[in-house]
């Protein structure tokens, strides 16, 4: 697994320009007071880089060659999820460092809840994306995987808009449902988000292993 991680990290580092641009945009967002969006954006893009490593592996029958090494399909899947978690953690750590610098310089006065919300939001959004995209990428490959994922995102957007309209038409008080979460203890919220993220990734991992075992190369 160590060899797979080194391989993928080296592949990711070949995209230095993209990483530099993403870092620059994220820093700009953090400096201008958009902490939650900035950290989520950074974590989301780094999660996409994990998907790109599968595309590299699939290119020109590379997966068939890769599996000739003493690497099981299960180990291959584990490595992708581990890589994703490492990159998400790196994004959260880098964003936190920038927030500390920004807060120390007094250029933006971030409240503790904003800092907390940015970290929790980036963890959850990146975990949801990885949980959905990795099985699809392994199942359908680069081109079909993108189409299926785009379809899922569009359907999710339509569903969200429909629910919003139904709630509005039915005059449902959403604040009564959301308020307990907003007033909940930060540690409990963080624990709940971590459990949710781990649960989604664990379910996604089981599906990915099943897909990988059935796939023919």
Image (spheres, rainbow, N blue to C red):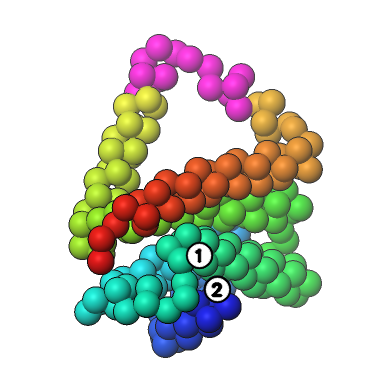
Q: Is residue 34 visible?
A: no
Distance, label 2 to label 1, CA atoms, is 7 Å
Measured as percent of width and height from the top left, residue 82 is found at 56, 64
Which of the two residues, 156 or 21, is positioned nearer the viewer here? 156
Label placed on residue 110 = none
Residue plotted at (60% across, 27% down): 178
- Structural crowding at the residue carrying mark 2, measured as other residues with C-alpha within 10 Å and reported as few (<14), some (14–19) or many (≥20): some
Measured as percent of width and height from the top left, residue 107 is found at 69, 70
Residue plotted at (38% across, 73% down): 67
Judge left or right: residue 115 versus residue 131.
Answer: right
Can you tell which quarter of the image residue 142 is in?
Answer: bottom left
Magenta segment boundaries in residue numbering: 165-178
User: What SS does tag 2 mark?
Assistant: loop
Measured as percent of width and height from the top left, residue 180 is found at 69, 26
* Quadrant location, the N terminus: bottom right
Q: Is residue 111 above or below residue 48?
A: above
Q: Main secondary structure of the magenta part?
A: helix
Q: Is residue 169 visible?
A: yes
Label placed on residue 75 = 1
Look at the image and say whether residue 127 sits in the magenta stretch: no
Judge left or right: residue 63 versus residue 12.
Answer: left
| Residue located beneath label 2 in the image | 1
Residue plotted at (29% across, 57% down): 215
């Amino acid at each position: 697994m160590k060899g797979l991680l080194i391989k993928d990290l080296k592949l990711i580092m070949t995209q230095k320009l993209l990483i530099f641009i993403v870092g620059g945009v994220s820093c700009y967002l953090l400096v201008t007071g958009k902490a939650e969006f900035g950290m989520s954006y950074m974590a989301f893009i780094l999660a996409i880089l994990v998907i790109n490593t599968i595309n590299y592996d699939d290119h020109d029958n590379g997966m068939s060659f890769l599996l000739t090494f003493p690497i099981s399909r299960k180990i291959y899947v584990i490595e992708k999820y581990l890589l994703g978690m490492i990159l998400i953690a790196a994004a959260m750590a880098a964003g936190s460092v920038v927030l500390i610098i920004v807060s120390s310089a007094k250029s933006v006065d971030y409240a503790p809840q904003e800092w907390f919300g940015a970290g929790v939001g980036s963890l959850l959004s990146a975990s949801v994306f990885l949980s959905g995209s990795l099985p699809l990428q392994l199942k359908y490959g680069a081109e079909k995987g993108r189409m299926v994922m785009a379809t899922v995102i569009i359907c999710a957007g339509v569903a969200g808009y429909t629910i919003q309209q139904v709630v509005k038409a039915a005059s449902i008080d959403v604040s009564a449902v959301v308020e307990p979460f907003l007033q909940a203890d930060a540690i409990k919220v963080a624990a709940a988000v971590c459990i949710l993220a781990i649960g989604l990734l664990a379910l996604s991992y089981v599906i990915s292993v099943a897909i990988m075992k059935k796939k023919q190369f």
